[in-house]
Each structure stands twice: as C-alpha cells, then as structure tokens.
C-alpha cells in the first residue's frame, strides 16, 4: 500500500485522513489524521491504520482512509455559518491560525453579494495581501456553498504555497434537544377560600418585618394590582405546628398550593447587615410533605446563628408555570427599559445566554439582539433543576413576544415612577391565562445594581469552571492571558459558596471571570461587588443600537408623506436647488451599490429602475428633456460605442504598432487600487465598484505607521478603518499599472 501511495502522490509529504460514513459536525476531531513530512513508511502507516480501525469503526460506522499530498500549511482556517455563530445563512465567521500556533480573533464576512468563484481554477492567496485575499475568497466560497445547499456548514481550510484548499466540510445537524416554546406547563390550582389555621395570607399593603413580603407592595401602582398569592409563617410558629399538628400543617399547605410548591425564607429587616439576603434558602418545587421536612431542617441553622426564630419567616407559594423568566432595568432619566430574557427558570439567566431587548419609552420603539441560546434551565417533575439543550430550530428564536415586552416595560416604568428611582425587577413571563397571575408577573426587586462592563478587548484562553473541584486546579495554571468561564452545574446555580469561592480564586490570582449569563442577574452582581473583573460572553463590541432610526438619505418624493400617513414620527428637510445635484451624485453611487448586490433578475430590474429614476430626476433638475439626452447618448454611442465589452485603457503612446490585450480579470483590481504616500490616500472613483462587490482595499501609509482599509457596507456606507500595523506591500509579481505599460510590445 505504501509503495503505491508514494508513487501516486509523487514521493513527497503525505497526509492520511480518516472519514466515516456516520461522521458529522459533532464528531469533528474524534477521528484521527496523521501527516508524514516525507514519503510514507510502512510501519508508521500500519500503526496509524491499526489505531484508527480499532477505535473509530465501532463508534462511527465504516471508515475510509484518504491519502493526499501534504505541504506544511501557512494558515489554518475554520469557516462556519452554523447557527451558534451566524444569524443568517449568508453571515460567516472565520478563525485562523498560523503554522507556529499564532491565532487571530474571530472575524466575520458576508457572502450575500460576493461573486461566485471559478470552479475550474485554483483559489489563489497572495502572500503580500493574504488577509485581503483570504476574506474575499472566503466570501466567494460562502456564496458557492449557500447556492448549492440550504444547510449550514463548517469548512476546514488550509492555505499553502499561495493557494487555498478545502480539506473538510461538515453539515450542521440537529441532535434533538428540547423546544422550550412547546414544553407543557403543569399546573394545579390551590384552594384560596378555606380558613387558615397555621399560615397567613399576605395582604397587599400589610407591613411586616420581612422585606420579601413588603416588596410586593412596591408593585402596587396605578393600573396594576399585584395578583400574587403568598402565604407565610414565622419560624417559631412553624416549629410549634410541626411538633403538635404536623399532618394538619401538611394538609393546609397542600390545600392552598395545589400540592406543588416552593418555600423561601427571609429574616427580619433589622438583621440585614448580619445575615445577607443573597441566596437565602429556598426549596425546589416539592410536595407539601417534602416542603415541611426540608423547612424543618432550617430551624437548627438559625439556632446555630443565634437568631431567635421569631425573627425568621418561611414564605410559601404554589408553583408558577412560567414559559420564561426576565430581568428588567428601568432607567428613569433615559426613559428606557433594558430587558434580558430566557426560557425556563429565571435562575438560568445567571449563567446561560439570554436575549437582549431595549424599549424606548419616549419614542415607543423596540430594539433587540436575539442571541444563539444553547441551553435553558428547566425543572424536572421531581423538582430538580436540569440544564436542557435547546433544539436547533429554536436556538435563534426570540424568547419574549412583543406583548410581554411591552407589559414588562409598562410595569417597570410605573414602579420606577412611584418610587422616584431606577428599578431592577425580575419577572415570570408567559404565565398561562388560567393561572390568573397575568401574562407577566413581577416577582422580585433588586435594591442594588452595578453597571456592566463592555466586552473584553483582547483574546483570552478560557478555563471552564463547573464545580468547586475545578477551582482547586486554577492554582496550578499560569494566570497570564486566561479567563475563568463559569459553566456551573445546576446544583451550583444557587450555591453561594460556589460564587464566593470563584471570587476568592479570581481575586487571589488576578484572573478575570466570564459569564455567559445576564449582567442584570444575581451572579454578575455578586462577582462584581466582590471586586472581580467580569466579562459577559455576548456583550457587543460597540454601543447598543438605539431604537430611533436615523437615515440621513435622499428619498423619493412621496416617501416622507407615506410615513406620516402611517402615523409615525418623521424628521426631514428639503434640499435647496443648488444642493440637489450633489445629493443626486451620492444617490447614484448608493443605487449602484444596491445593483451590484442584487442576486437575481427581478432584484436587478428593481435596482436598475431606481438607478434610472436618479438619472431621470437629475436630467429634469438640470433643465433637459429625457428625449434630448437619449438622442445625444445614441449619437455618442454611434461614434464611440457603449460600455458593453469591458475594455480598460491602460495607457497610450506616440509610437504606432502592436497593442497588448491582457485577459486577467485581476488587473482591474490592480489598476484601480488605492495609493498612499506620506499622509495622503488616493482612491480612484472607479474603485468603488470593486469595493461594493466585496473587495476590501488595504493601503499602507508607512510614514504614519498605519494601514487604511476601505469597504462598503450592505447599507451603502463607505467605511474607512485605521489599523495600527501597516500591511505588507503587495506582491510585485502581480504587476501594477507601470508594469502593465512596460510589458507592451516594442
């Protein structure tokens, strides 16, 4: 076998790759590959094959071995539009790593308007313009992929000797999981009418020594009366009832809650300094009998703290069948409500990625960031918390409907205005109508909040921390360039010792902490108040998009009035006659960008009609008739031709003789390339067509120590980006304008 392979592959370096019939994107990296810098050696190949077939075949079905020519890659690249990294099929993320292990932060590209690659030609990457060519080629590869498949993909790519090679392609697959939008919510109502022997039902406005009860009164505002159904019992009364009338107490708890309930505890307001209120005891959802047994165990705890039992109470309520949970922060000065939400239990917001919403109360507009959500926290039938994977088709669905968002914003503003301050409230959301608690239920108001930080500015190696045992290993690692990524097991979500130990280790070693959950939730507050530097995984690289939409664009004559007719607020002005020609030139370029990005005949026809209308309006503004312009154009076409052939004039000379025609399409890229010298960048207007087609132009200004990058966004905005390290000069073998002119025939 080795002799035959060496002959077929030329006798140089060889790589053996394995591929299984049942292999998919989740098995990536589980099957082995091995490279040989020189020709195959029989013993090495046989050893590799033995390991491969002994271990992999049983797990992945039939396995084949692929032998390829191997050359050391200059760059390894992963390109993906999987749902975890991309909102749409056309948005791609790519990571790259050099052969010596140096990696760059993930970058994005959009394939929607990219030209298709030539399928019969290699994909070339110039050494002197590697990042420019890589991005352009990846966009084209993404366009090719989306044109041929409606499934999301992951490419493994290498760049070697100036060429880009795709070495592996995997399809994203849905492995099930739970669709939290469709989970059944079990609910059994309690009997609220019978007399009470042991418990007290909390009456709205009743003053008690316990903050968790009194806080419900904060939610009592104009046009909203809290529908909470809470029962409570002081710990000393509870102890007496357990000792003398245990069964009767269990029966009463069962009756008022419906048999599925939660018990929480609180201490007297006077004990706030001595006994912090964060993460006091609460049960899972349990039966009445289990609730009494677990609560009984807390009596000894309070005695060990030398706290009189009459200073403690237990709060009891039936299970609330909510589809999702949310934290909302109302900024009274800015008149905005920021909302983070996730399916399942609200506690999941501490460590699992939520959706972000922001409602502008002044303009009544909503902005949102719908994230990829991999897990949610669910309560099992026995009351235990489970971190459930979310089915792929739901991972990028919005958690809250508009009706719930608006109700959360309304209640938050009413409460904030009543209290005369910003407020920070936790809500149960998606509560079934039959429960009688309202679509959203404000449950808890946090008294203290901390403004959250932006995304980290440099790439850090993540150390996953799920348990206290994981934290013990942190002392053995190099603290430089790492971050503790919290991925706790569900039993640690309300374990105050876990967060306390995380804070201790992070501060001792000087290591930042990263959470995937909401900065509005409890865990973030605890860590920040403990002095930790805390990052959030999903924080934007830039300021959030505010809900007011600003256009600043020239529009057709009837657009402003049509918006007013819809009842929307409009700010507009009309240009003077002397400004309109300049505005139309800009509009012409804007519409040309749209035409370049059109993907089919219908879209191209629409964009051409817009382009034509700009020209027609310009003709009328200049005082001409369309017919006379068409007549002049026809005459000029007869004499000098149209622009159909794509001829590009490189230069002219006095000497008559043979002419040179260059067929490479890359030359137009070179001919229109920006040039830089000293502190000046010159960009030919003709370059804008290529930039609109996805070519990112990079030009170094060595005197300033920067590289300038030009691109055009999907919104027809010209983007100029300044990079501090200059780009390498372009490969002179590609030729520039002077080279092309010099190559003309003598």
Image (spheres, rainbow, N blue to C red):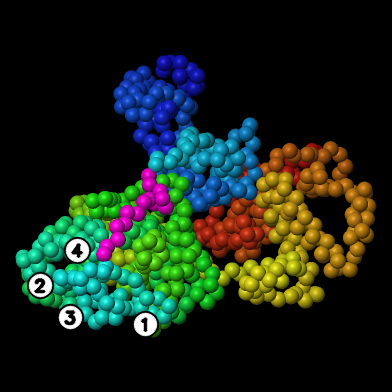
Which structural element holds mark 1? helix
Q: Outermost residue toward the front?
A: 194
**159 sits to left or right of 678:** left
- What distance separates the C-alpha of mark 3 from that of mark 2? 17 Å
Mark 1 or 2, nearer chain start:
2
Name the front one of labels 3 and 4: 4
Name the front one of labels 3 and 2: 2
Mark 1 or 4, nearer chain start:
4
Whether residue 448 appears in magenta in the rendering, the answer is: no
Task: Say whether residue 8 is visible.
Answer: yes
Q: Residue at position x 31%, y 73% from top?
A: 446
Asked if the residue at tag 2 contacts the one at tag 1, i.e. Cβ–Cβ closer than 8 Å, the answer is no
Name the front one of labels 1 and 2: 2
**224 sits to left or right of 362:** left
**Residue located beneath label 2 in the image:** 236
Please tell me how crowded label 1 is: few (under 14), some (14-19), or many (20+) other residues with Cα within 10 Å.
Answer: few
Q: Residue at position x 70%, y 39% from top?
A: 664
Name the front one of labels 4 and 2: 4
127 and 20: which is toward the camera = 20
Mark 3 or 4, nearer chain start:
4
**Residue located beneath label 1 in the image:** 419
Which structural element holds mark 4? helix
- What distance separates the C-alpha of mark 1 from that of mark 2? 33 Å
52 and 395: which is toward the camera = 395
- Give the magenta range: 177-191
Which structural element holds mark 2? helix
């Amino acid at each position: 076998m080795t002799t035959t392979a060496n002959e077929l592959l030329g006798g140089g370096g060889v790589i053996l790759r394995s591929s299984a019939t049942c292999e998919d994107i989740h098995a990536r990296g589980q099957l082995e590959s091995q490279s040989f810098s020189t020709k195959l050696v029989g013993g090495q190949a046989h050893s590799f094959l033995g390991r491969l077939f002994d271990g992999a075949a049983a797990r992945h079905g039939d396995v084949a071995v692929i032998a390829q020519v191997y050359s050391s890659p200059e760059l390894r690249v992963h390109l993906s539009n999987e749902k975890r990294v991309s909102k749409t099929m056309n948005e791609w993320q790519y990571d790259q790593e050099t052969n010596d292990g140096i990696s760059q932060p993930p970058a994005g590209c959009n394939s929607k308007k990219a030209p298709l690659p030539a399928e019969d030609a290699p994909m070339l990457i110039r050494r002197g313009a590697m990042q420019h060519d890589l991005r352009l080629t990846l966009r084209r590869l993404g366009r090719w992929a989306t044109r041929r498949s409606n499934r999301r993909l992951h490419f493994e790519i290498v760049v070697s000797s100036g060429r880009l090679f795709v070495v592996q392609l995997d399809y994203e697959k849905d492995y099930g999981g739970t669709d939290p939008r469709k989970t059944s919510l079990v609910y059994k109502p309690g009997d609220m009418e019978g007399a009470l022997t042991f418990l007290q039902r909390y009456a709205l406005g009743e003053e008690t020594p316990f903050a968790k009860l009194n806080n419900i009164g904060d939610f009592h505002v104009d046009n909203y009366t809290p529908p909470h159904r809470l029962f409570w019992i002081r710990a000393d009364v509870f102890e007496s009832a357990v000792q003398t009338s245990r069964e009767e107490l269990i029966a009463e708890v069962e009756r008022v809650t419906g048999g599925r309930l939660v018990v929480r505890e609180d201490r007297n307001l006077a004990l706030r300094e001595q006994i912090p209120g964060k993460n006091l005891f609460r049960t899972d959802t349990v039966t009445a009998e289990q609730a009494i047994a677990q609560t009984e165990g807390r009596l000894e705890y309070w005695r060990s703290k030398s706290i009189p039992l009459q200073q403690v109470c237990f709060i009891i309520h039936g299970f609330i069948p909510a589809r999702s949970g949310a934290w909302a922060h109302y900024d009274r000065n800015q008149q905005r409500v920021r909302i983070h939400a996730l399916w399942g239990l609200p506690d999941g917001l501490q460590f699992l990625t939520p959706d972000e919403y922001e409602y502008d109360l002044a303009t009544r507009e909503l902005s949102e960031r719908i994230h990829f959500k991999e897990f949610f926290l669910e309560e099992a039938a026995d009351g235990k918390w489970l971190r459930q994977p979310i089915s792929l088709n739901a991972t990028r669905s919005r958690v809250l409907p508009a009706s719930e968002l608006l109700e959360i914003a309304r209640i938050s503003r009413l409460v904030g205005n009543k209290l005369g301050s910003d407020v920070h409230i936790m809500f149960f959301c998606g509560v079934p109508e039959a429960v009688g608690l309202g679509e959203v239920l404000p449950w808890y108001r946090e008294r203290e909040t901390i403004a959250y930080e932006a995304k980290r500015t440099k790439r850090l190696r993540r150390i996953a921390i799920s348990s206290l045992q994981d934290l013990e290993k942190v002392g053995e690692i190099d603290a430089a360039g790492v971050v503790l990524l919290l991925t706790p097991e569900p039993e640690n979500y309300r374990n105050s010792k876990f967060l306390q130990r995380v804070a201790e280790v992070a501060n001792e070693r000087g290591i930042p902490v990263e959470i995937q959950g909401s900065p509005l939730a409890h865990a973030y507050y605890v860590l920040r108040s403990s002095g930790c530097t805390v990052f959030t995984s999903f924080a934007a690289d830039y300021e959030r998009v505010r809900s007011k939409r600003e256009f600043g664009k020239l529009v057709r004559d009837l657009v402003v009035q049509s918006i007013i007719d819809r009842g929307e607020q409009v700010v507009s002005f009309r240009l003077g006659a002397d400004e309109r020609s300049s505005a139309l030139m800009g509009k012409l370029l804007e519409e040309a960008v749209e035409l370049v990005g059109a993907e089919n005949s219908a879209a191209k026809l629409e964009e051409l009609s817009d382009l034509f209308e700009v020209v027609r309006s310009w003709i009328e503004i200049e005082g001409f008739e369309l017919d006379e312009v068409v007549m002049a154009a026809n005459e000029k076409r007869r004499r000098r031709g149209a622009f159909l052939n794509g001829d590009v004039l490189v230069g002219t000379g006095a000497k008559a003789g043979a002419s040179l025609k260059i067929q490479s399409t890359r030359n137009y890229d070179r001919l229109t390339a920006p040039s830089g010298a000293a502190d000046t960048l010159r960009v030919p207007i003709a370059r804008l067509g290529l930039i609109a087609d996805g070519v990112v132009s990079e030009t170094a200004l060595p005197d300033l120590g920067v590289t300038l990058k030009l691109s055009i966004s999907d919104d027809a905005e010209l983007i100029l980006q300044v990079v501090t390290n200059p780009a390498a000069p372009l490969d002179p073998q590609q030729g520039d304008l002077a080279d092309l002119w010099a190559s003309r025939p003598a």
